[in-house]
Image (cartoon, coloured by chain):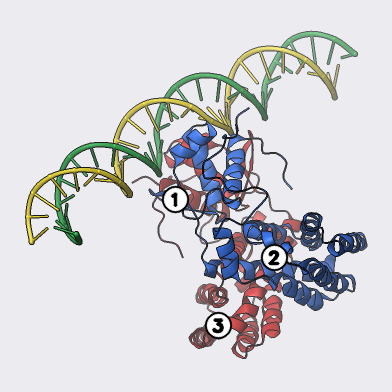
Chain colours: A red, B blue, C yellow, D green
Amino acid sequence: MDATPQTLVERLAAAIAEAILGGELPPGTRLDEQSLAERFGVSRTPVREALRQLGTGGLIDVRPRRGATVSSVTPELLEELFVAMGEVEATCARLSALSMTPIERRRLADLHGRMGEDAEAERAEAYAASNLQFHGAVYAGAHNATLAEVAAGLRRRLSPYRQAQFRAPGRLPRSHAEHGEVVAAILRGDAAGAHAAMLHHVSLVEDPFEQLSRVAAGKGRPAAPARADGGPPPDLRS
Amino acid sequence: MDATPQTLVERLAAAIAEAILGGELPPGTRLDEQSLAERFGVSRTPVREALRQLGTGGLIDVRPRRGATVSSVTPELLEELFVAMGEVEATCARLSALSMTPIERRRLADLHGRMGEDAEAERAEAYAASNLQFHGAVYAGAHNATLAEVAAGLRRRLSPYRQAQFRAPGRLPRSHAEHGEVVAAILRGDAAGAHAAMLHHVSLVEDPFEQLSRVAAGKGRPAAPARADGGPPPDLRS
DNA sequence: ATCTCTAAGATTGCATGCAAATAAGCCATA
DNA sequence: TATGGCTTATTTGCATGCAATCTTAGAGAT
């Protein structure tokens, strides 16, 4: 999406966000500027700017004179975020049905077709990657960068709670079938149908309570396990 | 919505945003830190943090090593923002139809009833104020703070281009009638109807091109006229 | 034992300073 | 006159320092 950040502040913001999304900084963690500055080998000033930037995204809470903490995600908030993402994605699907160019429609159909193989073969990794592409195509097809940004932000924020989604047996073919409904509606310009199909697809996640407890138990993001010991700090300078 | 900001940075961010929305800092204006710092009588540090915070909202563009500028609003972007706002508001209306409590429904109906008098009497000021309340009630009724925040942010960002909306003769009764459709659908729990009615209501704005040219001509925000001479700078300290 | 008040420590908020990068000005050249 | 390269000036990025505020530990009173 965006190129490698050029400034230290942006790299810091990205690194802190990644640490939070990756589970390394669990909800409730106090983010004191000094520690973060030492951890990344910089001064407090860029850390402060990065925290301020992250604060607007909802990932952290910044209370005046009290510092920043990783936002704690209650089951209620998680439910709310899932609903919001579903609604915004459904809206994008609706607009895509109305606004996609013939080329975009064809590319979406092609992508969907290719995903079928990975779905049948239960190749979860490959399917997950293509899944991101698929939803990104729907965002783009709405021809509305503002909505696309909101949708992508919500999807990103919820990513820790969607990791194990494709692990459930039989979930891949089912997901692919649901995608098929979305694609079909978009291709025939059926706005209401695309909306309904996407809402149905995105809403079919497990119980938020269960999602939350699984992540809390440290089962989120298996590829980048949390390590509270704090491994070698990445050098963000240069 | 939010109480008076406690920190200098937040007051700065609010002041700069207000200056932009009020037309005092037209699109394209370079926001160099030194000038802003002198204007508000503070140092560059809090200004930098305020700019970074504003950057995430789309109101200003911050390019690394090149400083910040007030985002220029092209007709295309304006159209996009209007569409996004309409869709999100329609979604809130849809959810309101499904989720509003009986008390919320009653309050919405009451508010709508009271607005009828102002609409008939063509009291634009009073109606505009109540209009904000009305849409706020629909946001709240969706019971989804995330969506409500997105909707409120878009509405706020578009406020300069909606100022003269209620000036057009006959617009007030018409707006009230459209509100009536929304209220009726919400009250009877008609999700699709509420969505459609709200989309219809919000989409009925003038041509974006015209909106843009009117604001560019300095006719936006008549209550707080732009003054390029820079009047007495507000003291944000204390 | 619990609560309150106090004081020390820790942390944030903001100002200042310096180095690096960008932008502006200038002159030479085509 | 227009263009290219060089010098100067402005601006941003980040580090450091100090004051104000919050947190926390502990003594004393109830």
Picture coordinates of residue B16, whole percent (x, y): 57, 44
Asked which quadrant contains residue B173, the reply is bottom right
Q: What's the mark number on residue A100?
A: 3
Indicate the amino acid at tag 1: Arg
Assign the C terminus of chain B to one quadrant of the image.
Answer: top right
Picture coordinates of residue B62, whole percent (x, y): 46, 52
3 and 2 marks in contact (CB < 8 Å): no
Element assignment for label 3: loop
Element assignment for label 1: helix
CA neighbours of label 1 inside 10 A, class few (<14), some (14 to 19), many (20+): some
Q: What's the mark number on residue B72?
A: none
Indicate the amino acid at tag 2: Ala
Q: Between tags 1 and 3, which lies in front? A: 3
Q: Is residue B168 left or right of residue B73?
A: right
Indicate the amino acid at tag 3: Met
Q: Which residue is mark 2?
A: A84
- Numbered disc 2: what chain? A
Q: Earlier in the sequence, mark 1 or mark 3?
A: 1
Distance from disc 3 to disc 2, alpha carbons, whole Å, reads 23 Å
Q: Earlier in the sequence, mark 3 or mark 2?
A: 2
- Numbered disc 1: what chain? A
Distance from disc 1 to disc 3, alpha carbons, whole Å, reads 34 Å
- Numbered disc 3: what chain? A
Say if residue B26 shows up in the picture.
Answer: yes
1 and 3 marks in contact (CB < 8 Å): no
Q: What's the mark number on residue A11?
A: 1
Same chain letter for marks 1 and 3: yes
CA neighbours of label 2 inside 10 A, class few (<14), some (14 to 19), many (20+): many
Same chain letter for marks 1 and 2: yes
Q: Nearer the viewer, residue A25 or B1?
A: B1
Element assignment for label 2: helix
